[in-house]
């Protein structure tokens, strides 16, 4: 996992380039995030940093978690995220209390954004898996034009195979969009503008990180 910060999706808007072109962007309030814990190979057997986002009152969290924050004199945070760091020299740059801000990114670079998709409830196979369905007219499909079709066999093997695409709960899953372009960064307001759509509903928490498969 590459270095990144937690943020909150504000919503979508559009901006104009110098050439007059309209660019749809998603506005994310990213950070500031605080390093809560540094994990090392000597103690935890792997190296990583744990970052926190959004302050929360002491009375709203349990005593074990409250002690976790007080151990490093960090204000309690509502959201925590662990980021693996492989190189020891990179890990040495971070100590509890160190802040990660939106200036970690710059306009023009590519990022990966992970978020929880919108919940759509219990849906059929046409909406959930983009099934084609049958002809929407009488005589060909009739009342079954949105059905998924046969799900099993006869005597052998006489069961429904695991993983078969069927109606069910759709959404509320972690989705990662890769190689999204950063259009603009506002360090004063902790805002980052991303070209295109970002997973999740407005107000949802997302993780913005350096693109792993982006162009070098």
Image (cartoon, helix red, strand yellow):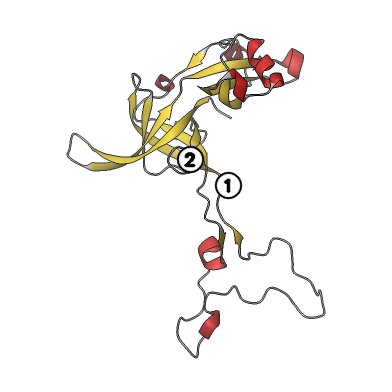
Q: Report the number of discs.
A: 2
Is 207 rendered above or below residue 150? Answer: above
Q: Is residue 12 visible?
A: yes
Location of the N terminus by quadrant is top right
Q: Residue at x 66, y 77 (%)?
A: 150
Report the residue marked by disc 2: 178
Which of marks 2 and 1 precedes in the sequence? 1
Tell me residue 17's x, y (percent): 22, 36
Q: Which mark is residue 92?
A: none
Tell me residue 20's x, y (percent): 17, 40
Q: Are marks 1 and 2 in contact (CB under 8 Å)?
A: no
Tell me residue 175's x, y (percent): 54, 44
Outermost bottom residue: 139
Q: Which dot, 1 or 2, sits closer to the camera? A: 1
Report the residue marked by disc 1: 173
**Measured Cα–Cα span from mark 1 to mark 2:** 16 Å
Q: Residue at x 55, y 52 (%)?
A: 171
Q: Residues within 10 Å of mark 1 (few under 14, many from 20)?
A: few
Is 166 positioned to the left or the right of 44 in the image? left
Is 67 rendered above or below residue 206? Answer: above
């Amino acid at each position: 996992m590459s270095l990144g910060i937690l943020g909150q999706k504000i919503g979508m808007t559009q901006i104009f380039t110098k050439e007059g072109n309209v660019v749809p962007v998603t506005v994310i309030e990213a950070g500031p995030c605080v390093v809560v814990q540094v994990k090392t190979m000597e103690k935890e057997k792997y190296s990583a940093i744990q970052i926190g986002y959004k302050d929360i009152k002491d009375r709203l969290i349990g005593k074990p978690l409250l002690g976790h924050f007080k151990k490093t004199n960090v204000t309690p945070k509502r959201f925590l995220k662990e980021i693996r760091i492989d190189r020891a020299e990179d890990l040495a740059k971070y100590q509890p209390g160190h802040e990660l801000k939106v200036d970690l990114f710059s306009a023009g670079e590519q990022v990966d954004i992970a978020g929880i998709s919108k919940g759509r409830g219990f849906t059929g196979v046409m909406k959930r898996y983009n099934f084609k369905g049958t002809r929407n007219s009488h005589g060909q499909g009739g009342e079954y034009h949105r059905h998924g079709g046969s799900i099993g066999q006869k005597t052998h093997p006489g069961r429904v195979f695991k993983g078969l695409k069927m109606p069910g709960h759709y959404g509320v899953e972690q989705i990662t969009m890769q190689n999204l372009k950063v259009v603009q960064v506002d360090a004063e307001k902790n805002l980052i503008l991303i070209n295109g759509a970002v997973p999740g509903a407005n107000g949802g928490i997302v993780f913005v990180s350096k693109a792993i498969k982006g162009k070098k």
